[in-house]
Amino acid sequence: MAILGRGIQRAFKGGPWVLTEDLELCDKDSAHLPVHAEADDDSPFCMIGGGEMNLLAGFYLACKFKPAVMVCAHGGRSKYLESIGAPSESEVMTGYLGTLLSTVKHDPIGEFEIVIWPRERQLPVPANTRQELLNIFDLALDRGLSRIAIVTVGVHVPRTATYIAKHLSVYPQYRELNPVLLESEEVLLDTDREKYAARVETMRASKAFARNWAREADGIQKIVRDVYGDAKPKVVVA
């Protein structure tokens, strides 16, 4: 099972590294801020984060299904992390996963392998959804696994699915794999609707969701046309 990364940042200057919240204030290039800033849904720089939501969904799934192997944010550091010698998103996210698993009465953490992407392991390509999926697929082949559950927030599901289809079409070695894509919000609603319904509705009804949806849709057509670039789109303020 793979929990896709959605960014990390310091809780405050010099503070601990935390996962992005449901709504996230980004910079003008749509990149994560190194230090958390309060989200403002009216700001054109406010987007969907969802790192914490992905982690919660992955945690519930891990407890229920006990996958053979788990990864969190399985890829190299983004430029904003590498430039300041920060840990990898995988290291931070896996640390929080371990904390959650330790709260379970019957701790399942020893029942499966957790693979962490170390900060020292950089690839010659930026950390992004395309590369993270390739890394996940390569790990599955290396471990002799075929069935893969991939967890991400709903606004990111269509673009992730498009990349999965593109990879299976372009690379013959991956066609033996059976990836299943799961939406974090729906996993949380299935787990405890009373607890998570308001939170999910707030995310889905936000202006940030609408902004992200437009960008994801633009990204999808570029993936299909095979002209998707690594640069994040700049935020245009009217």
Image (tube, rainbow, N blue to C red):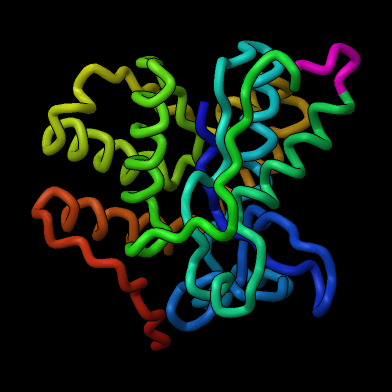
Residue 213 at x, y percent in the picture: 38, 55
Residue 230 is left or right of residue 208, and the answer is left
Occupied quadrant, residue 116: top right
> What's the magenta region?
104-108
Compared to residue 1, the image places residue 218 above or below, namely below
Taking the spot 41% from the left edge, 36% from the top edge, the residue there is: 136
The kind of secondary structure the magenta stretch mainly shows is loop
Residue 10 is left or right of residue 1, and the answer is right
Please state which of residues 134 and 189 is positioned toward the viewer in this rendering.
134
Taking the spot 64% from the left edge, 53% from the top edge, the residue there is: 22
Residue 101 at x, y percent in the picture: 80, 27
Q: Is 4 within the magenta?
A: no
Please state which of residues 182 and 133 is positioned toward the viewer in this rendering.
133
Compared to residue 53, the image places residue 174 above or below, namely above
Q: Is residue 204 visible?
A: no
Quadrant where the C terminus sits is: bottom left
Please state which of residues 3 and 126 is positioned toward the viewer in this rendering.
126
